[in-house]
Amino acid sequence: MGYLAEALSQGFTSGDGPFTRRASGILREMLGAGTALLTTSCTHALEMTAILLDLQPGDEVIMPSFTFVSTANAFALRGAVPVFADCRPDTLNVDERLIEAEITPRTKAIVVVHYAGVSCRMDAITEIAGRHGVAVVEDNAHGLGGSYRGRPLGSFGRMATQSFHATKNVQCGEGGALVLNDPDLAARAEIIREKGTNRSQFFRGQTDKYRWLDIGSSYLPSDILAAQLTAQLEEFDTIQLRRHAVWNAYHKGLADWAASNEVSQPVVPDDCAHPAHLYYLLLPDLRNQQALIAHLAEHGVQATFHYQPLHTAPAGLRYGRPAAAGCPTTEKVADRLVRLPLFAGLSETDTARVIEAVLSYEVI
């Protein structure tokens, strides 16, 4: 409670206070970014990327169907059309081999999501984007602390977004960040985040009064939330050690069972370092997915499925369109995936209990 008490005692509880600056500085250092702006959520950071891209109704944004709804919502709100691409069967990331076929004269961006913190094939994706003159945006909600070929996730796109929701590796309940790897976007992003005004410049003494300059919204979190986030970021390495211990225990302890039951474990390519954001199993089919979740619940273990395909969702059908070849892998993955409990406070005893409960399940 030290930082929270300090934030309250300073009397500065609105945004852009001392802890906002401290947390932003840590993020810049972690990602090698020029600008990192804390936001009220990753969703709002994504909305800011849509505004910064000057998207117009009818513009297209290619993204995975296997992702959270915020990835699509942010762009649909600007009138853009999410184009849903299928995922790879190994990492469950957007299949880079399918992206180029979906590029049209209306394509303005490619949005990648590093599922479970395992990197997309960023060299291929940035090459495609560069050749067609479209922006790359990283939805890095899962990926803080991960890397691709030694480079931090969140540093590849023109912009990247982070999540500090309660389910993430470091969190402040609700929160996010917009990371800008293009310095030309920094000044406008600051204005958009402050309701479309140059209020931040005013408080820095750079203007005698602040005015409405652009569209924007209230995307700035309280410094109290930033205080909690600062404490978490400062303990990032410690948190990661424990999460990796749980992830590795699952991966080793379930390997033989998975191999003998046609169950797939997470795939982490050699050139990727992941942040142990989540651990999942891919069961043979929907019946086994549901049965394993029920079996674990009977043993006092909370497990769950994950994303449902956006291209078949009611809003996905209304506001977006699937890739020409559809998204068959996404549909299969959604019906097979089971997530196991994973958080830094999970004890070795409880981790072993989860493993034992999974091992006691007989695949149908």
Image: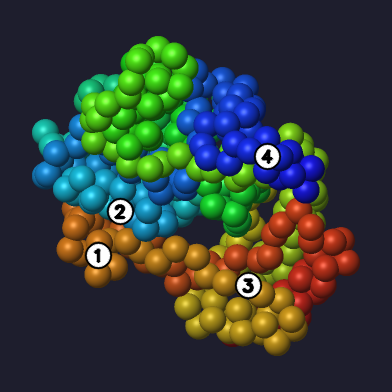
Q: Please give the residue where the numbered disc 3 appears in the rendered image.
A: 303
**Mark 2 and 1 residues: CB-CB less than 8 Å, in contact?**
yes
For the question of whether residue 332 can be seen, the reply is yes
Residue count near mark 4 (Cα–Cα under 10 Å), binned few <14, some 14–19, many ≥20: many
Q: Position of residue 334 (x, y in %)?
A: 44, 67
Tell me the element at label 2. Answer: helix
Kind of residue indicated by mark 1:
Ala
Kind of residue indicated by mark 3:
Ala
Disc 3/disc 4 C-alpha distance (Å)? 36 Å
Kind of residue indicated by mark 2:
Asn
Q: Position of residue 183 (x, y in %)?
A: 39, 16
Disc 2/disc 1 C-alpha distance (Å)? 9 Å
Tell me the element at label 4. Answer: helix
Quadrant housing residue 31: top right
Q: Position of residue 359 (x, y in %)?
A: 75, 75
Tell me the element at label 1. Answer: helix
Labels 1 and 4: the sequence-earlier one: 4
Residue count near mark 1 (Cα–Cα under 10 Å), binned few <14, some 14–19, many ≥20: some
Horizontal arrangement in the rendering, residue 193 relative to residue 133 (left or right): right
Labels 2 and 1: the sequence-earlier one: 2
Front position in the image: 281 or 55:
55
For the question of whether residue 52 can be seen, the reply is no
Please tell me whether residue 128 is drawn above or below residue 326 in the rendered image.
Answer: above
Front position in the image: 291 or 260:
291
Q: Please give the residue where the numbered disc 4 appears in the rendered image.
A: 7
Labels 2 and 4: the sequence-earlier one: 4
Q: Please give the residue where the numbered disc 2 appears in the rendered image.
A: 73
Front position in the image: 361 or 297:
297
Q: Residue at x 52, y 70 (%)?
A: 305
Labels 1 and 3: the sequence-earlier one: 3
Circle nearer the viewer, 3 or 2: 2
